[in-house]
Image (tube, rainbow, N blue to C red):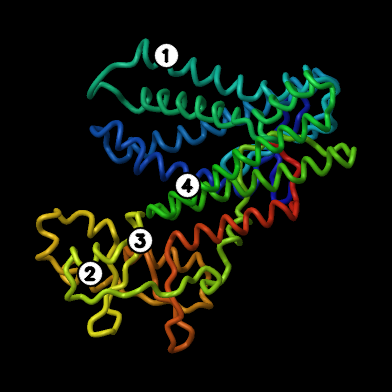
Amino acid sequence: MRGSIKLFSIFGIPVEINATWFIAVAIITWSLSTTAYPSFFRHWATEQYWLAGILTTLLLFTSVLAHELGHSIVALAQGLKVSGITLLLFGGVSKIQGEARTPRNEFLIAFAGPAVSLVIGVALLAWWFAFSPVGDQVGPFHGIIFFTGWLNVLVAGFNMLPGYPMDGGRVLRSAVWGITGDTRRATTVAYTVGRYVFFAFIAWGALQIFNGDLFGGVWIILIGWFLLSSARNEVKGVRANQSPAPSSVDSPSLNAMDQLSFDVGRATRPMPPMFEATWSVEQVFYQGLPAHPLTSIPIAKQGELIGFILKQDLDAIQIHKRVNVTVGELMDTGSLRVISKHEPALDALQQMDKNRVNQLVVMDEDFVIGIITRQDIVETLLEFSAANDDAGSGDHGTSI
């Protein structure tokens, strides 16, 4: 794999690390040390959090290597070749050459990885529940056992989602293959189920963005997009009766970030009807409002836009007080933010997060052409995802 460094060999299988691995180590260590560990164990010193974060990250990747070795060793036992294992961004890939000859073989190869992760996770958690102290006596050693155990259980569970070409999708394919005897039908069924799983992933990520979690939402969407791309290419290879290298991957591709580079203008909606700042909340409700609590409502003063409020702000006012409270009183003057229609959607999301708003006024030079909200960006992303899926493009032949 391009940009990879060979470390050593295990059972004759070369093990490499990709340059993206270092990014993963930094991000996971930072997340564990500044958020996860302080949330669970509040009496530790700062250096203990960082020590535990670094060691847990290294143990996690050691466990991922064990996961990939599970796939590879079983594949070797089935007579297939393994050209190597690469550790990369948030996971690893086993480069297995050839296809399983029987449904049983495919099941064993696919299930071996999650089984290894589950055994490691259960063993560590069993030790934690049996021997770990309580309260302030819990030190970094015990915390590392706890988190490494749970992370392995999560890796096993995630990889067993029935989305081809993830491990769970391959298990599903082996089951359908065994029942029907038709590999093409088995691939189609597993791929179809996987599409629903991955679109659900993308929708979940979109919901996170819509609720203000930009980083987490974008990352989830990246995973879903990468899995869709991987599935498309795997299916193309199978249907063309080729022998692409089925692999086990636990990592998304950063190239999917390009999907957020579309112009703001493509997701812009017309400006909704404006309400005068002097109107009472009761008057606004009388006009009729959408049901969604995060709907952006423009507020004007003598016809000139001065800001926005959300429907949830109106819903929060008690019914008996709505006649005496004006929408102008509820409006935050900082809610009026603008963006050019030529700016990328990612910049729009970042500006919304920075200013803690749910919408931006879209400008074409000196003219207002509408607004853009998180929901508009999410819907445009999903449209692009569906269009790309129908087009069937991609670069990878991998399974998660």
Classify mark 3: helix, strand or loop: loop
The Cα–Cα distance between marks 3 and 2, rounded to whole angstroms, is 15 Å
Q: Quadrant of the C terminus?
A: top right
- What is the crowding at mark 3: few (fewer than 14 residues within 10 Å), some, or many (at least 20)? some
Q: Are marks 2 and 4 in contact (CB under 8 Å)?
A: no
In the image, 277: left or right of 336? Answer: left
Q: Nearer the viewer, mark 3 or mark 4?
A: 3
Report the amino acid beneath label 1.
Trp
- What is the crowding at mark 1: few (fewer than 14 residues within 10 Å), some, or many (at least 20)? some
Q: What's the mark number on residue 27?
A: 4
Q: Which residue is mark 2?
A: 332
Q: What's the mark number on residue 127?
A: 1
Classify mark 4: helix, strand or loop: helix
Q: Which residue is mark 3?
A: 295
Q: Earlier in the sequence, mark 3 or mark 1?
A: 1
Q: Nearer the viewer, mark 3 or mark 2?
A: 3
